[in-house]
Image (cartoon, rainbow, N blue to C red):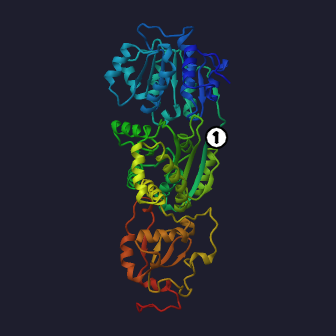
Amino acid sequence: MPFPSIPPNLLRALSERGYAEPTPVQAAVLQPEAAGKDLLVSAQTGSGKTIAFGLAIAPTLLGDNERFGSGPAQPLALVVAPTRELALQVERELGWLYAYTGARIASCVGGMDIRGEQRMLRQGAHIVVGTPGRLRDHLERGNLATAQMRAVVLDEADEMLDLGFREDLECILGAMPENRRTLLFSATIPKGIAVLAKRFQLDAMRIATTSATEAHGDIEYRGLQIAPHEVERAVVNVLRYFEANGALVFCSTREAVRRLHGNLLERGFAVVALSGELSQTERTRALQALRDGRARVCVATDVAARGLDLPDLGLVIHADLPHDSEVLQHRSGRTGRAGRKGIAVLLVPHTRRRTVERLAAGAHVKLAWGQPPSAEEIRSRDQDRLVAEAIQAAAEPTEEDLAAARLLLAEHSPELLAAALIRSLRTRMPAPEELSGGGPGTPPPPRAARDGRDAPSDSGPTPGFPTDVVWFRINVGRRSGNADPRWLLPFICRRGQVTRGDVGKIQISDRETRFGIAANVAAKFATAARRADGKDAEIHIQAIAEDEQAKYRPKNRPHSAGKR
């Protein structure tokens, strides 16, 4: 369906940008019934909302004219966005949409020179775009004239309330003329938005381009079950497996962002971090690196990623789980935008599966459950990638390249040279991680396949196990942590800096797990096991008291230390 009747100069701009027909939200706000009315619109992030409200307010601003007047201009429209990045993005979008109308568009956002904004407002602007705090500042300073305002748009209104801008929004809306149009655009319509709409809108038309029970159709959701201590390694494998042009990884705290950012940098990823502790200059530099392709991964907190719109963002990873269904939607909605497909991956520790199932149900999302990609799966997929990259690298060689190739072929076989090219390309790829895998969603292996590591304590010695051991306990069990030898054994080895051959029987009960460590490395193990960080901090390992050691030893096995 082509665009309905809109001002010809806007239609020209759309045509030049390749817009042949409106998106659902654009079609909805352009229907005849919506003309001139206040609108309360809920639509998915990335559905074309900026163009939608730009088109919706055009007749209100232009009337029967094709262009704005050339004389001094007082603002006719105000657009309020939650973050600096989103406001500047809106300014850019409206800039090309209104390019042939003679519109002057000004931005007023935090982090920019307020005196420069003041001069711009005095010179005249037809449309002003800004963030709540900065716009309120200009209002209180008398820099922003409101007498001629014909339309006010709140973009991502739910996010602005989440960020604590209610008082600023009420101040801004209260300063506008009573006869203006008010358009509220929001991904969801929580109670706070409904209250704001009732207070500041008049007989608003409600538009919902998606059902409250309809998931974002362009996003594929995956729940990957992991061992609790392997979150960061699982992030590495997910990034390596999908190799998206752009990926956004969510952490719950600034400290978690710092740690994961550092680990990914160390492994060779082109990654930047966004958190509240960054200066505006650092934030701008990080976003520019993402937009121009120098960085492909961004690690961020929820607040730092508010209003973020990144090109080619094909993957969102929830490294730390969202605390409610709305956050799940907001985070995941950064991908699958403007008709592109995206993937949202939740890394789910064994103990959190039911929590995540509730989150998904609340967000009306269907999760495809599975395990994180293994190192072997990544290496297999790399083979195809490396061949494709090698072919691309060899495309359109210069005469100088061909001359060098002839010299090499005179001394080496084609197979050897191709292998050297593949090896050089492979060194640019971060190494995948070995994961323990397993989890409640995976059928357990037969008891015999578990190497006897959960055998009862009175069983005899098992071949291959150390016979002289010191016993330790760990504060996870079947009920208190979904303890399973498949992830416990790798965890014990990593935490205590020992090998699998140093670990004896693993005995799992409801509330704790007991295991033996070869006596010759027990002291070293005890020292290393006391050091915990990050996701491991809540898992405690301690040696069982000497007077209790005997009751955990197999009854038919002598103990070389002498005590029984």
Residue toward you, 8 or 130:
8
Q: Residue 126 location in percent, x, y? A: 45, 15
**Residue 360's x, y, as percent?**
61, 48
Residue drawn 49% across the image and 22% down it: 96
Rendering coords of residue 538 (x, y %): 44, 62
Answer whether residue 45 is visible to the viewer in this image. yes
Is the residue marked by circle 1 packed among few (<14), some (14-19), or many (20+) residues within 10 Å?
A: few
Please give the residue where the numbered disc 1 appears in the rendered image. Answer: 217
Q: Position of residue 207 (x, y in %)?
A: 64, 27
Q: In the image, is residue 396 above or below residue 548?
A: above
Report the label total.
1
Q: Residue furthest front?
A: 410
Look at the image and tell me in which quarter the C terminus lies.
Answer: bottom left
170, 58: nearer the viewer: 58
- Could you tell me which quadrant the N terminus lies in? top right
Q: Is residue 431 visible?
A: no
- Specify the amino acid type for callout 1: Gly
Question: Secondary structure under badge 1?
Answer: loop
**Residue under the point 47% across and 68% down:** 491
- Is residue 350 placed above or below 489 in the rendered structure? above
Is 532 located above or below residue 140 in the figure? below
